[in-house]
Image (cartoon, helix red, strand yellow):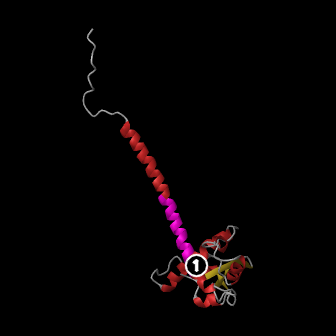
Amino acid sequence: MLNFVVLGFKTEYKGDKAIDWVEMAPAGEGFERTHTWHRIKDIKPPEHANPDSLSHRDMIERWKVVGPKYQAYKDGLEIPEDGTPLAAWSGVTPDQAKALRAMGISTVEAVSEMSESATTKLPFSGARRLPALAKEFLDGRGKAEAQAEIEAMREKMAAMEEMLGEYMAKEKRGPGRPKKQEVDAA
């Protein structure tokens, strides 16, 4: 997986020609030192390229991250964030989240992928445990969603069993002639 952060976009005009740019930085320890601007036309995968080329595959993977954000920029919308925001996770305090964002890490998924060298640069104790805690949180969230789905299925099954019981309880005669009615001989 590519480990970079899209920081923003800009459009420059040279005469009547517009040139779109994207600012990117590596997530983690190099975030503060390395911010680079790339022309959109240079990182967008060409339509007619060798699909087996490693550089083309790399461009496609990068565009999967940049493309939707670029489209939001062009549409005048807020640039979407990938993953679960740090604010939704109780594993970090607001001050810790601020320190993580200063390193370009703004999602729980990015925390789960942090290297050990990146965690040692964080200015608070217990930072080395953060990736494991983030993975545990993400796994638990998936289990909670699965449990909710199972519970919904159980409720549907119970309703279906009740309907089946009602259907079976109705007096129903099998195929054939109807019962003879006794006639009172008067």
SS at mark 1? helix
Residue 108 place in picture, x, y as percent: 61, 76
Q: Nearer the viewer, residue 160 or 125?
A: 125
Left or right of 17, for residue 45:
left
Residue 173 place in picture, x, y as percent: 30, 32
Q: Quadrant of the C terminus?
A: top left
Q: Residue at x 64, y 73 (%)?
A: 90
Residue sticking out furthest to the top: 186
Q: Nearer the viewer, residue 6 or 94?
A: 94
Q: Which residue bears the numbered disc 1? A: 133
Left or right of 8, for residue 165:
left
Residue 71 place in picture, x, y as percent: 63, 70
Residue 93 place in picture, x, y as percent: 69, 77
Q: Nearer the viewer, residue 30 or 172?
A: 172
Q: Quadrant of residue 101?
A: bottom right
The range drawn in magenta is 132-150
Look at the image and say whether residue 23 sits in the magenta stretch.
Answer: no
Circle 1: residue type: Leu
| Residue 18 visible in the displayed image | no
Task: Give neighbour class at mark 1: few <14, some 14-19, many 20+ (Cα, 10 Å).
Answer: some
Q: Quadrant of residue 181?
A: top left
| Residue 7 visible in the displayed image | yes
Look at the image and say whether residue 146 sits in the magenta stretch.
Answer: yes
Is the stretch drawn in magenta largely helix, strand or loop? helix
- Measured along the vertical axis of the image, is residue 170 above or below residue 135? above
Q: Quadrant of residue 118?
A: bottom right
Total marks shown come to 1
